[in-house]
Amino acid sequence: MKKKVQKVVAFIVIMFSAILVFSIVSYSPEYMYRILRYRESDVNDYNIFPERTIASSANPYYYEEKAMALEDKLISYTYNGEIHEKELKKFLEDTQTTSFIIIHNDKIVFEQYYNEHSRDSINTSFSSVKSIVSLLIGIAIDEGYIENEKQSIAEYIHEFKGTPFADITIEDLLMMRSKIRYKEGYLWFGDDAKTYYMPNLRELAINDIKIDTDYEEGKFHYNNFHPLLLGIILERSTNQSVSSFLEGKLWQKLGTEYNASWSLDSNDSGFEKMESGLNFRTIDFAKIGSMLLHMGKWNGEEIISEDWIIKSTFAKFPLNQQEYKNSLLEDIGVGYKYMWYSFENKRGGYDYFAAGKYEQYLYISPDNNIVIVRNGIEAGNVDWWAAVLEDITNIVVEFQD
């Protein structure tokens, strides 16, 4: 019996070693090092990647403050389907929230930091940056760098001319509805891992993507290759780095107080981690929401056209649930349009938001003139943060009344 166990263990060790050797040969040493060293992505990953600085505004905008006593308000939320209640302060602390800001009528009504964070602590976007990428595409269209979102991606990525990828449009990428194959997974052969840790994301996006022959036209399928391709389009159409374009066309115009940064795939490649890597202070991220509430105008100038905001931030309601079948949005009443999520709120209007891993949120309620930003270390044992943020929005409105 003992010898049999030893043989099984030896076989497992040999197979694991063979797989590891094959992987090291098949993938770059830097990629395999990152996978083995860092494994699951983390909110402090801005420390492990090189970065490109995004300079703050020379004329910062400072919100007027009109504090509301909200910390003792009861918050209802669900976890594993069970309803719980906590006071707001306790709820935010326990859910590993790092920063929580509420802007109402262009005034800060609540700004608190938890879990050893402060106003000048760095937070990272994870996938909420995809919504910012959408804004950059809109600005590029407004200013004539890109003709329109209906264009083939091959118009800007010439390597795709004469291939099946030429049938894919910029809009397909923004909508997460393309026939580009995407296999989820954080093991080294999964596309989640590749799009996060690969040291040359341009090469990955152009040379390694494949067509999904089973894709059903019009189906929503979340795909991290899409923002990479949009980043390449932005680079090539504007003839500058994505960080530089963000800095000049958005970040500085918002009146930001702090420098931001965008994590890069590597020093050699120097390409922004388009799917996840914007690093910022929460107070500055809130200004993006305020600009959107003002339909693209902020701090004395138009930053992006009203037309793009209307076009990009709200899905078509009522939703066609067939589009979302077998996806992360199936049957939850949330739509996806140009990298923004939206849903019908309890007051009969529509709220929308950007969202990233560990529940990084930029939440916007146009009818109530409210912006909420939540950053955190973890998701915090909450089933659906958007529902919590909607309830907090209603508490603010009732408090004001």
Image (cartoon, grey):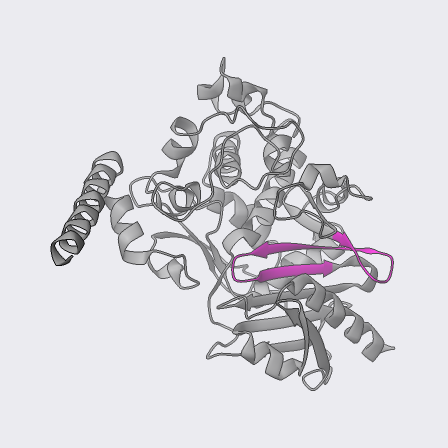
- Residue 309, given in percent of the width and then of the height, sits at 73, 45
Q: Would residue 379 appear left or right of 306 to someone viewing this image?
A: left
Occupied quadrant, residue 29: top left
Is 106 drawn above or below residue 357 in the view shown? below
Query: Of residues 196 and 192, which is closer to you in this image?
Result: 192
Query: Measuring 41% from the left and 61% from the top, which residue is drawn there?
Result: 42
Q: Quadrant of the C terminus?
A: bottom right
Is 159 drawn above or below residue 114 in the view shown? above
* Residue range highlighted in magenta: 343-364
Q: Would residue 299 appear left or right of 229 to someone viewing this image?
A: right
Query: Of residues 140 and 323, which is closer to you in this image?
Result: 323
Residue 221 painted magenta? no
Q: Quadrant of the N terminus?
A: bottom left
Query: Of residues 19 and 281, which is closer to you in this image?
Result: 19
| Residue 299 seen in the figure | no
- Residue 186, given in percent of the width and then of the height, sits at 40, 49
Is 143 drawn above or below residue 330 in the view shown? above
- Residue 57, given in percent of the width and then of the height, sits at 55, 59
Please identify the residue farthest to the front as the structure is shown.
1
- Residue 378, given in percent of the width and then of the height, sits at 50, 67
